[in-house]
Amino acid sequence: MISSEQVQYFFTNSEDSICIISAAGVLLYSNPSAEKLFGISADENVKIWEAIPYVAGNDNLIQLFIDSILSKVMTHEAIVDYWNNAGEVRNLHVKMTHFSKDDQSVYLVVITDLTQLFKVNSALIRYTSPDIADYALMTQEGQKRGGQTKTVTILMSDLRGFTALGSKLTAEQLITVLNHYFEAMVAIIQEYKGTVIEFLGDGIFTVFGAPKDVKDHATLAVKCAAKMQAALKEVNEWNEQNGFPALEMGIGINTGEAVVGNIGSEKKMKYGCMGSTVNITGRVESLTVGGQVFITENTRNLITEELNVISERSFLPKGSPNELHYYEIGGIGDILIDDTSGNNIAWQDGYKEEVYLFYLLEEKTVGVVTHKGTMLKVSENGKYALLSSDTELVEKQNIMLRKGEERVYAKVIRQESDGYVICFTSIHQTDRK
C-alpha cells in the first residue's frame, strides 16, 4: 500500500507540473514544477486560468480549463501552446481527471512539458524525414542497429550538368538554387509517401515502402517522378526570375528487395537502404538525360495505373549474366512528362558546322584519348545536336566535348545515317548557339 507520504514525495519531485483544483477552478495544490511553470502557488487562492498570462497564444489553454470545469468532464486532455511571463513558448500536454469523494469534487491536473521533445522531433524531421523521425522516436527498432529485408521501390534523381553549372555560381548562389530545388522536390516526395534517405550532392535518394509499409509503392514512386519532372518547370521559372540558370533532372526507379534499417555504431547511426536493388537504380538513373524518367521491368510489372511507355531498352548490369530491361515513360495516369526522346527535333536554320574534340566517359571519369567530330546541326532549343565522327559511339555513351577552353557534356541518344544525335547534359549556352 502506498502511503500518503510516498504520494506527496512523488508529487513534490515530479518533473511534471501537478495541480489539484476545485470544482470552481480554484487552485488547491501545486507542486514545485507547477509553481515554476505558472509562477504561482496554492496559497494565492486563485483560479488556475487566472494564473495564465492573457495573451493571444494562451487562448486555447485558458479555454481548456474553463470548458473542462463548466462541462464537468471526467477526463480531458490536449496538447496546447503556452506563453509564460518571460515571453517563452512551451508545448504542453495537459490532462485533467475528475474525482469526487465525500461530496467534494476536485480535478487532478497533470501537465507534461513536451517542448524539448518537439524540438528534437523537429530537428530530426529537418535532418532526416518525418517517417525516419517517427521510426527513431516511436519504435523499439528505431534505437537499435540492424535491419530487415523488404521489397521496396527506390527512386534516384540527379541534376544534369550541375557540377559545371556550379563553377559559374558563387557558393551562396549554389546553395540558394539547390535549397529551392530540394524544397519543391521533397514536398512532392512526401505527398506520394516517399522517404528521403539522403541528398547525394545535387541528387535525391528516396525509398517507397520503408520504414513504413506503403501499399502500391511502385505506382506511387512513378507518379512522384512524373510530378517531379512537371514541377521542375516552375522551379526554373523561379530561377529565371532570380537570375539563375535552368535545371535539368534525370530520374531512375527500380523495385526489389533491399536491406533497410539502422547502420553505423552505437554512437552514430543513420537509417539506410542497401543492396543490388539500390545499385541498379543508380545505374538506370545514370542512363537518363534531363527530363527523362526510366523504370525497370520489376517496377513496371507492379504499376496499377495506366502507364505511358515511350520506349524499351536493356543493358547488362555488372556481374549479372542477364540483361535488364528498362523503359522510358511519358507519364502515368493524368500526369504527363514532356517528350525528351529526341524523336521530333526542330533544328536551327543556317547553323554553321563546327569541329570539336571530344572524350569518352567511363562512369564519372573522362578518358585520355582525344577524338574528333563535326557538329553538323543544333536544335532550336539548344538541347540536341547531330555529331559526325569516325569514332564508333554507342547509345547512352557519355562524352565531353571541348572547343578551346569550353567544356560541355552530352549523352548519345541514337545513331542516324549522317551522325549521332546527342543530348547535352550540362548547360553551356555559348556552346549551343
Image: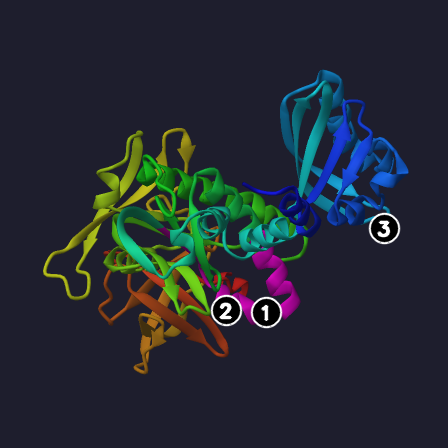
Mark pair 1, 3: CA separation: 48 Å
The reply to whether the C-beta atoms of the residues labelled 1 and 2 are less than 8 Å apart is yes
Indicate left or right for 157 with 343 as reference: right
**Label 1: element kind:** loop
For discs 2 and 3, the disc positioned in front in the rendered view = 3
- The boundaries of the magenta stretch are 155-181
The residue that label 1 is drawn on is: 168
Q: Residue 366, how many percent across, how many down?
A: 35, 76
Estimate how packed mark 3 is, as few (under 14), some (14 to 19) or many (20 or more) residues with alpha carbons within 10 Å: few
Mark pair 2, 3: CA separation: 51 Å
For discs 1 and 3, the disc positioned in front in the rendered view = 3
The residue that label 3 is drawn on is: 86
**Label 2: element kind:** helix
Indicate left or right for 18 with 313 as reference: right
Residue at image location 32% in from the left, 79% down from the top: 367
Q: Is residue 412 above or below residue 31?
A: below
Indicate left or right for 224 with 68 as reference: left
